[in-house]
Amino acid sequence: MGVTKLWTLLVDACQNDITVSSLHGQTIAVDLSSWICELKKIQIAQKIPNLYLKNLYYRTTYFMKHGIKLVFVEDGTAPAIKKASLAQRNKNRVTSLDRIGLKILSEKCRELLNKLGLPCIQSGGEAEALCAQLNHAGIVDGVLTSDGDSLLYGAKKVYRNFKMDVGTVDCCDMIEVEKKLNVDRRGLIAMAMLSGCDYDKDGVQSVGVQKAYEFVQLCTKLGVDPLKRIMTWRTNSELKTLQKVRESPQKKPSHCNVCKHLGTKPDHFKNGCGPCNTEQSCDQDNQVSCTCDSCTADFHKFELNMREKALRDPGFPNHMIIDEFLQSTKELPSPQLEWKPVNVPSLKSFLQNQIRWTNVEFFNKISELLVILQVNGMEWAVSEKLKPVRIVRKSTLKKTPSVIVEWKKLSIDNVTESSQVITVPEENFSRHYPSMLQEFNRRKEEEKAQKLEEKKANKKGKKRKDTISNKGQRSITDCFAITKKARRSPTPPVKHTESSSEEDIDHITITRPKKIRSAIATGKHTSSSNKIYDDDHTAFTPKVRSSPFKHASSSKQMFDIEHTSFTKKARSSPSKHSGSSSEDCDVIVID
């Protein structure tokens, strides 16, 4: 829709990806027909019934949440000059000036928008024309549409390429277009007539938007209005004369190769040059162009070629197209724009019937919408204000400092819990509930200070003496205790003397050397051996003169190291065996 490939030319003058939040407080006119066409394409691709209504709700409420007032404009009866274009679009359908299919979809959209409290007005013709008129008259701050015709109708600022997932739009400002591209609204209309538009899809043969732009720049250089120049192509006597000169079979007269004026170099050297204002020779640096018919025709060659192609169409220029685009200069009657609060009960019934939302889904979404509206300065759209119960915590939502707040639910909500948790921007919340936010910050500071004191107290109680404070960096072994087995002192050997009393012997304690213990553990020691190793690893065979017991057997006088045990305590002094241990010694019993 619109001028063919116009946006490719205007891309350098547009601001891309500006945030929707930067439009806070503005009033924007929306071309509803443009939105419906975009949303209907998505629905056809996904094959979901009434998906366009669901997406319309999300799009609209997204702008409302950012504090933007929307005015929706519907298409009316198509202009008569657009009949051929509509017939081309609907080859297999019955053509009509009333767009019946779009009208049916618009009725449902209008019903949804009215329940959201937004004004929806109908244009007498094209929706983008009325949007541009509202912007031109200063009633709205911009136009939201993908149709470039809005600029030709007189819009000062057009927003397009809305991306809800990242929250950005592209902005085309006519002030920037005039500054960077040196083309105004009338120049755009002239380009539309040459390259093609909604009312003349073909335009002039072999003339695209780039050539049309070059023609506008040529007119600017000549100091003439491009639109007026086109309108006089059939009657312009100067252009008719130049066209005859170009078509004439006569040879182009000679020109000086120094100053490029009429005449030859020898003539100028002898008699001077009139355009150079010299009596002898000529001025090579003179910037005055030659004004002969041949040079003038060459200068206008680009325009003459375009004019010749355009005038092949007997209906060119079409004054109806020019009048259609210039209609916004007429006085616009002040429309009745009224924004109302959201009608929650009616909206609930509509969305449940059309989109099949459950009660819980609806109240969760509408509660969030109403809360954000009332903190974003859109109180007029809230029929019932929700009250905050408490601040749960702070957070960051899409790089925006926010607070998570618990709110009381709507009075008509009897399906959800007693309260709902909704995240809102901290700055907006502080404007409406400063005392609650201050109290929350104070409590958080107190809790933080208390935790810091507890941390210091715990750290002080567990602090250990720094034994290496003067040794530089501490060793890793200083951070934990190291336990080490104590070395066991060797057990002194038992001394055997002849003077030992036989009656004092209850048991004999012999220390088992480590080698014997390891041999026993590995099974290499045999019990048949009667040799006993002392602590100095020397073998000896103990001798016992007589048994102190009457029923002693000679076979039991052998010392069986592996099968010994305690039977009696020694009657001798404990000091004789103070170095022995039950773990490190064997007891040999002599019965």
Image: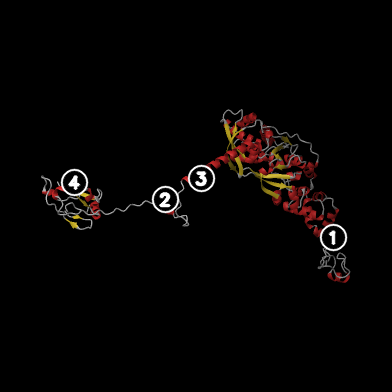
Label 3: how many residues lie within 10 Å, few (<14), some (14-19) or many (20+)?
A: few
Q: Residue at x 63, y 42 (%)?
A: 164
Residue type at numbered disc 4: Arg
Residue type at numbered disc 3: Lys
Front residue of 233 and 492: 492
Question: Sequence order check: which comes first, mark 3 or mark 1?
Answer: 1
Q: Residue at x 79, y 43 (%)?
A: 326
Identify residue for label 1. 293
Circle on res. 456: 3
Circle on res. 571: 4
Q: What secondary structure is marked by label 4?
A: loop
Circle on res. 480: 2
Front residue of 546 and 58: 546
Front residue of 510 and 393: 510
| Alpha carbon distance from label 3 to label 2 | 22 Å
Residue type at numbered disc 1: Asp
| Alpha carbon distance from label 2 to label 4 | 49 Å
Question: Sequence order check: which comes first, mark 4 or mark 3?
Answer: 3
Q: How is the image coloured?
A: secondary structure
